[in-house]
Image (tube, helix red, strand yellow):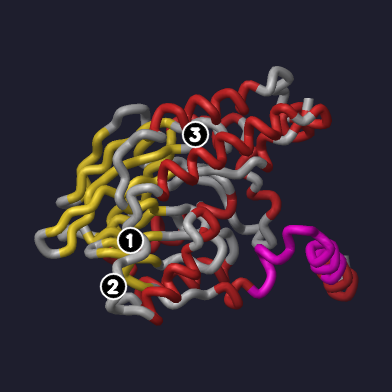
Amino acid sequence: MSMKSEYEEYLERREKMKKNPMARIWINQESRYVKPFQMYGNLYYVGDSWVCAHIVDTGEGLLLFDAGNCGNGATAMLIQAIWEMGFNPADVKWMVLSHGHVDHIGAVNFFKRMFGTKIYLGALDAKMFREHPELALVQESTDYMDELFGPDVEIHEGDKIKFGNTEVEFREAPGHTEGVISCFFDVTDGKETKRVGYYGGFGFNTLQKSFLLEIGDTNYSMREAYLRSIEKVINEKVDIFMPNHCVNVDLLNKRQFMIDHPSEPNPFIDENAWKNYLQMKYDDLKKLMADPAQN
């Protein structure tokens, strides 16, 4: 193959990607950069305007929740956000992944290879990587050098893991993927302590009829699993609902409120947000399940 034909093939790949409805995720990723900020006490936001990433300063190293989207731009933004927040990316000792989809695992290999960061992933999504890697949707990335990985630790129901001075209690929450995790932990601001709740995957894209039939779930069992997962944790006491996508908590508007009204109560402290959002997703899924076109 000549250099000219290779270049033409490259242009064809670019045009094909631009026509992809999800192209906005991969193209001009830097346009989604969000100035990092302190959500509360030792909890910080370092994600972009679409997919979230959070840091907990444990006193003995940094705990990072999720690794951003795949693509060099997304990884660069995450690194920049950590620096801009006043931390050193090399101090990220642990990384907990909400689930095994392409838009949450982008910087895993970079952190693992560069800094020796220890990676934690739900056991069933680790199994998905081994047996059905296509379900991670990594093939949708424009960076063809992105690759999946084996986590250092597989998370199971009821695990309690200590990261520095922070103990995290994990629950399995299958639905969006089989290996979605939810978890709960405390953050502190001086003498005040708040309980954080994290739910790792709300999207219905993997619960659509076409998707479930393609993966062989002819009984739509993952929809029922999603409902059971919400039922299991909806009544947990949560002061701060930590999202994995900004839309879960209207994060960008709450951030702007903090900037515009610094003397007002922290909008992320809301003891009703967790239950209200989980109930909404529960009800929305029930509606989808009742739709004749989805059965």
Three-letter amino acid code at disc 1?
Ile
Numbered mark located on residue 179 in the image: 3
Q: Provide the residue span drawn in magenta.
A: 11-28
Q: In the image, what residue occupies the spot 29% across and 31% down?
A: 159
Quarter holding residue 32: bottom right
**SS under mark 1:** strand
Residue at the spot of label 2: 87
Residue at the spot of label 1: 55
Q: In the image, what residue occupies the spot 23% across and 52% down?
A: 194
Quarter holding residue 41: bottom left
Q: In the image, what residue occupies the spot 35% across and 54% down?
A: 270
Instruction: Name the one closer to the observer, 53 or 111.
Output: 53
Residue 139 visible in rendering: yes
- Sequence-wise, which precedes: disc 2 or disc 3? 2
**At which x and y percent is residue 283?**
59, 35
Q: Is residue 282 above or below residue 144?
A: above
- Sequence-wise, which precedes: disc 2 or disc 1? 1
Q: Could you tell me if the residues under marks 1 and 3 are in contact, i.e. CB atoms within 8 Å?
A: no
- Sequence-wise, which precedes: disc 1 or disc 3? 1
Determine crowd level at label 3: few under 14, some 14-19, many 20+ residues with C-alpha closer than 10 A. Answer: many
Provide the major secondary structure of the magenta segment: helix
**SS under mark 3:** loop
Q: Could you tell me if the residues under marks 2 and 1 are in contact, i.e. CB atoms within 8 Å?
A: yes
Numbered mark located on residue 172 in the image: none
Three-letter amino acid code at disc 2?
Phe
Q: Is residue 127 above or below residue 37?
A: above
Q: Is residue 176 above or below residue 118?
A: above
